[in-house]
Image (cartoon, rainbow, N blue to C red):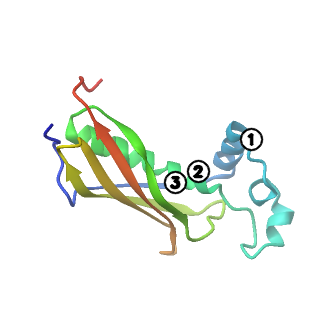
Amino acid sequence: MKINLDAGDVATFTKTLSESDVYLFAGITGDLSPNHINEEYGKTTSYGGRIAHGMLVLSLSSACSTMIQARSGQACVSYGYDKVRFTAGVLLGDTLTVTYRIDEVDDEAAKTYASIQIHNQRGELCAVATHILKFFDAPLG
């Protein structure tokens, strides 16, 4: 299958994480760790306040994979994430920018491999991962 993307294609997404984002994510996942929902506890940590869930931070990359899918004009699904690392805490109110770069297009396996880097407004790298998209022959809805 020929995938309509090239290595080097990039999508970006920027969002400020709010208190409501963190509380909604905590409620949905059941992850009520004091790291995320207890400001007084957060002040006692090396972060100096509450931090967002790592998986919430990583989930922002879904916006970029959707942009990439739209650019390809082809149907695909997330095949998974590899090499996920959370390299810095994300404080409530931080503005994050996701950079999603296609590193490899494997037409034979109908997959793309993309590097994800998520930086905060201070330029600190907060999360990295490799994302795999699996393409298939179906209409793009």
Question: Relative to 126, does residue 9 appear above or below in the rendering?
Answer: above
Q: Amino acid at mark 2?
A: Leu
Q: Amino acid at mark 1?
A: Gly
Question: Relative to 79, does residue 125 appear above or below in the rendering?
Answer: below
Could you tell me which secondary element the residue under label 2 belongs to?
Answer: helix
Percent of width and height locating residue 10: 27, 57
- Residue that mark 1 sits on: 30
Q: Amino acid at mark 3?
A: Leu
- Residue that mark 2 sits on: 56
Q: Which is nearer the N-term, disc 1 or disc 2?
A: 1
Residue drawn at point x = 22 percent, y = 34 percent = 74
Q: Residues within 10 Å of mark 2 (few under 14, many from 20)?
A: some
- Residue that mark 3 sits on: 58
Percent of width and height locating residue 91: 65, 64
Image quarter hosting the C terminus = top left
Image quarter hosting the N terminus = top left
Could you tell me which secondary element the residue under label 1 belongs to?
Answer: loop
* Contact (Cβ within 8 Å) of mark 3 with mark 2: yes
Marks counted in the figure total 3
Give whichever of 53, 112 is nearer the camera: 112
Q: Could you give the CA–CA distance between mark 3 and mark 1, rounded to whole angstroms?
A: 17 Å
**122 left or right of 110 in image:** right
